[in-house]
Amino acid sequence: MKLYYAPQACSLAPHIVLRELDQPFELIRVDNRTKKTIEGDDFLAINPKGYVAALQLDNGEVLTEGPAILQYLADLRPDANLAPANGTFQRVRLQECLNFVSTEIHGGLGWLFSSQFPEAVKALIKEKLFKRLAVLNETLGRQDYLLAGGFGIADAYLFTVLRWAPLFAIDMNQWPALVRFQASIEQRPAVKAALAAEAV
Ligand SMILES: N[C@@H](CCC(=O)N[C@@H](CS)C(=O)NCC(=O)O)C(=O)O
């Protein structure tokens, strides 16, 4: 498998999960500005959407969209318990969680990267985002992970996108459970290895 990634980007989540699962994989860096891989290949030919993460399977198929990639990976090794089994209600809870992280947190923070938005628009985005972060703070004040069953793919995803918050002068200390969550996930050997491999 090949994981196309950009440092600090949302592709860190599948990167962490690949390492959590001890899956052999090749890490291929993409320049999001030029849409070229580190080897000079045209990334748009690999993923016409032009964004990371993209996972190329050994049969050549390319899978995109973080929540789909994460679930595909978790299902390769059900014994690792990174996702509840397909067909169970808990799996639907996981999908609820992945969708929340994707649309409300990743989506919200993602807009803040835009240099074209006026500050007033960014303030509105932050106002909405902060309400979502307060909900997560409450959940993670009650339990160590997003789903009660232990560390899973949604945690890797949330950890990844929350790392962007300080880039936008968001003081995470207003959500102490999120600060604790970030610190605890960062201690995982797979997370340390992924961060080191991305050199961030
Ligand atoms: N819907 C996609 C969004 C992926 C995404 O936002 N990727 C960002 C990095 S976090 C990216 O590569 N952006 C470059 C671009 O849009 O040109 C997903 O959930 O995987």
Image (spheres, rainbow, N blue to C red):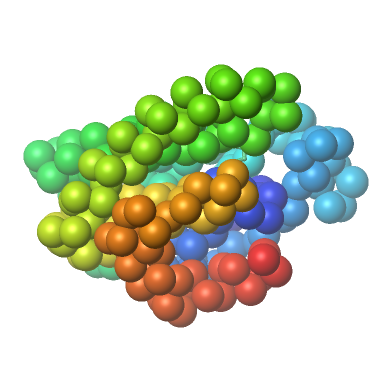
Q: In this view, does 38 lie to the left or right of 173?
A: right
Residue drawn at the location 76% of the way across and 47% of the way down: 30
Quadrant for the N terminus in the image: bottom right
Quadrant for the C terminus in the image: bottom right
Q: Can residue 112 be seen by looking at this rendering?
A: yes
Q: Where is residue 175 in the image (x, y as percent from the top left)?
A: 32, 54
180 vs 74, nearest the viewer? 180
Q: Can residue 76 be seen by looking at this rendering?
A: no
Q: In this view, does 107 lie above or below 5?
A: above
Q: Dividing the picture into quarters, in which one does residue 96 lie?
A: top left
Residue drawn at the location 56% of the way across and 75% of the way down: 193
Q: In this view, does 125 lie to the left or right of 140?
A: right
78 vs 183, nearest the viewer? 183
178 vs 6, nearest the viewer? 178
Q: Position of residue 148 (x, y in %)?
A: 14, 58
Q: Where is residue 69 in the image (x, y as percent from the top left)?
A: 46, 43
**Ligand 1 quadrant in view:** top right
Residue drawn at the location 56% of the way across and 53% of the way down: 166
Q: Dividing the picture into quarters, in which one does residue 135 lie?
A: top left
Q: Is residue 42 above or below residue 145?
A: above
Q: Is residue 180 above or below residue 174?
A: below
